[in-house]
Image (tube, helix red, strand yellow):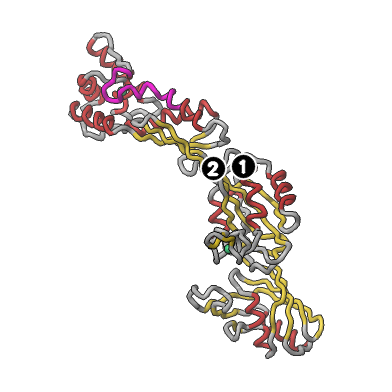
Amino acid sequence: MSVLEDARAVDAVGGVCDACLGRVFADRSFGLTNRERGQSLRTVLGLEADEPPEYVDPADCWVCEGYCGEFEVWAERAAEAVEGVEYETYQVGTRAPALIEENERMLREDAGLDADTGEAFKSEFNREVGKRVGQITGTEVDFERPDVQFLLDLAADDVTAGVNSAFVYGRYRKLERDIPQTKWPCSACDGSGMQGREPCEECDGTGFRYPESVEQLTAPVVEDVMDGVGETFHGAGREDVDARMLGTGRPFVIEVAEPRRRDVDTDRLEADINAFAEGKVEVESLRLAEHGMVERVKRHDASKRYSAQVTFDDDVDAESFAEALAELDGATVEQETPNRVDHRRASKVRTREVYDIEGELHDSRTATVEVHGAGGLYIKELISSDEGRTTPSLAGLLGVGAEVTALDVLRVDGEEEPFENEEFFRD
Ligand SMILES: [Zn+2]
Ligand SMILES: [Zn+2]
């Protein structure tokens, strides 16, 4: 059958608006709206029959029950639902009444066509309302990860707007020891701060094992500036609580839930965070990031450079110290899961490379050792041997007990390429 014959059959069912007629032929002639398709077909049918075409107002249409005349109204409702929220991209979803979907099938079957010929009402509604939302608000459709997700529930006569998270990338330095990277709830009271009716003695009622974290010293400022309702801190790995993070800092992403502001001035944000953290933590290189940056900082392979203060149980001379370091330089190290690591974690042997190691013996009992190693290399154990669980180690090679008394991370760098890949930034 030709398009025109099919159109005549659909038109003959009667009482169908132009959009509902045109939607049956939505896979024909791109660039037209379904309403334009329906109107054109009716015009040609009228010409053929030499009778005035009978256009049907959507308000009188039994298929869409008037919804095809309400695109503008729903678009305005969607725009109102996010008034005061800053966003650049959106997506529209429609929950169509079951009755309309049934009407669509009936129309096609009555006209002798397949029940799913053309386009579904829901798709047209998404597109037509979506187009108008863009025109009203000056924003753009994004089918992958929009800032705002509208849901038009026609049967419930309701419009909801889900606001997706915003992301800020940066690098942090932790200038004081004994600060964890993220919030560390007190295990004695499960973070509640209470034991029964009394304040928890373990944490003085704070609910936290450590009163501050890099997260708590940075993320609340971002959450506040973006006017969100929650935050999550994502780090590119984490240093030990007692280690400082110095040098060029560690990459991180702060995620803010349901932000009302997205396009924030990152230079100002940086200054605000640094003032708030009072020199315990510093951030730099802040940029607005895409959602994909979270996976990037969490998964990207990175090498680390450390500086360790080391003390020995017995005297060490310069020659054997130098020999031991030469032995470790470029070595592949086997490490069993360290004793200090959570015992619930299954023990296994891992191999990690020492890219570069150098050191300075201050006196026969103390030294500074600087190590550049692959991600996951345990530095404290590389020095101490962890009771023989790490080989080779500095203590093992010297035959003298050795311990890290202070550890600083100096650099965290991507192995293959830098963390800062432009495709993950928004600005
Ligand atoms: Zn209709
Ligand atoms: Zn507690």
- Image quarter for ligand 1: top left
Q: Amino acid at mark 1?
A: Met
Q: Is residue 172 magenta?
A: no
Q: Earlier in the sequence, mark 2 or mark 1?
A: 1
Residue at 61% across, 65% down: 201
Q: Which residues are magenta?
A: 59-75
Question: Label for residue 2?
Answer: none
> Disc 2 on helix, strand or loop?
loop
The reply to whether residue 423 is visible in this rendering is no
Q: Is residue 17 above or below residue 128?
A: above
Question: Label for residue 258?
Answer: 2
Determine the image quadrant of residue 33: top left
Q: Quadrant of the N terminus?
A: top left
Residue at 40% across, 31% down: 158
For disc 2, the neighbor class at 10 Å (few under 14, some 14 to 19, many from 20) is: many
With 145 as the anchor, is 44 left or right in this view? left
> Residue tagged by mark 1?
226
For disc 1, the neighbor class at 10 Å (few under 14, some 14 to 19, many from 20) is: many
Q: Amino acid at mark 2?
A: Glu
